[in-house]
Image (cartoon, grey):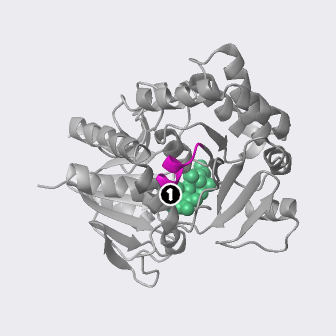
Amino acid sequence: MKARWDIFCSVVDNYGDIGVTWRLARQLVVEHGCDVRLWVDDLRAFERMCPDIDVQVGQQWQEGVQVRHWPAEWPGAHPADVVIAAFACQLPPEYMDRMAECERAPLWMNLDYLSAEDWVVGCHRLPSVKYKGVQKYFFFPGFRPGTGGLLREAGLLERRRAFQQDAAAQQRFLQSLGVAPTAGARLMSLFAYENDGLAGWLDVLAADGRGTHLLVPEGRILGDVQRWLGVNSLSAGDIQVRGALTVQVIAFVRQEQYDRLLWCCEFNAVRGEDSFVRAQWAGRPLLWHIYRQDEDIHLDKLDAFLELYTAALSPAAKAAVVTLWQAWNADGDMAQSWKMLLEHWPEVSQHAENWCLEQGLQADLATALVQFYESWI
Ligand code: TRH
């Protein structure tokens, strides 16, 4: 019998919550034959990355996943065999009561935020709280052995590599987005929160000896881009040229298309959690805009990742990557640090591919969850 999974996603803000859970839900269906219901409290964020979603409908099927709207008033449902609360979201109290009434209580897990900090290994799969006798467990994604790993679909890296070796496929794809790359220019993508450091970075790109074609999906960074360009508005399709820099705004695309966009670019600026992971699977150098948290605790997370990510780099290349990422996340000098990175470009590029291959050796997150369930029953 197929295992039944309920995944609960509460959209706090942005797209990471739904981005991660939607990816996980599909993978559990396609690769592990699970019966998955994805409960989402805000279908509008979902619609951005999956335009087939009908935001008016309480129950619909998308790519083999039963998508259920999770309204304030709980509609009632029998608990599944495995229950995932994504990013520590609170399950409906009625649902928790039903879990406690089950003859055999479900496996209940909190799928946590991604972090490279070393305490994660010690907490992964530990029991958390109990509710009326039903035990909850921590499940941590991560980069180190002993964590739950990262979301990675079967064959992803092979598909990525084939695409990167196929110039015609890349050209067709970019054309479908309305992008005709500027000849000789470095193609880059920019997905970030508001960032005062952007102006310094764009200044140096505009003054560079080599051209840059910067693709900016519609989103929070556009205000900063507009200010730097000195224009009142920007929307998908707009192209502006300043010196060696071409800035092109593109529409927010489906998740699969966003992957291919990352694969096409020589450098990707990403943010949050899911795009950050996808940029690593692209095997290209990246820049992470981490999600800001109170008391700057996100900076510890940033340092922990940098420590791990740069461990195999030469000291000079490591310093260049660390300086750039810290500048982007803590108001440093983006112009100077970008120039530093360019000096180490070949090493940093090769490293991005090596890191991707190394991470690809770990079991992926969906498989790790299924294995945990199998060992639990
Ligand atoms: O949107 P985010 O900033 O999400 C954040 C983080 O997850 C953060 O950790 C969390 O606490 C907060 O939300 C609530 O960044 P993230 O995680 O990269 O999610 C973006 C998703 O959007 C990802 O799945 C990729 C997808 N995407 C598209 O599908 N199309 C696009 O064009 C773009 C730019 C992104």
Quarter of the image with the N terminus in it: bottom left
Within the displayed image, which quadrant is ligand 1 positioned in? bottom right
In the image, residue 337 lies at what x, y percent? 79, 32
| Residue 261 shown in magenta | yes
Residue at (65% x, 40% y) in the render: 287
- Residue nearest the viewer, comparing 292 with 168: 168
Query: Looking at the magenta stretch, what is its main secondary structure?
Result: helix
The vertical placement of 339 against 176, above or below, is above
What percent of the width, then of the height, locates residue 190?
66, 53
| Residue on which disc 1 sits | 258
Which span is picked out in magenta?
Answer: 259-266
Along the line of sight, the residue nearer the viewer: 90 or 278: 278
Point out residue 345 in the picture as x, y percentages from the top left corner. Answer: 65, 29
Which quadrant holds the C terminus? top left
Q: Is mark 1 within 8 Å of ligand 1?
A: yes
Pick the front one: 119 or 234: 234
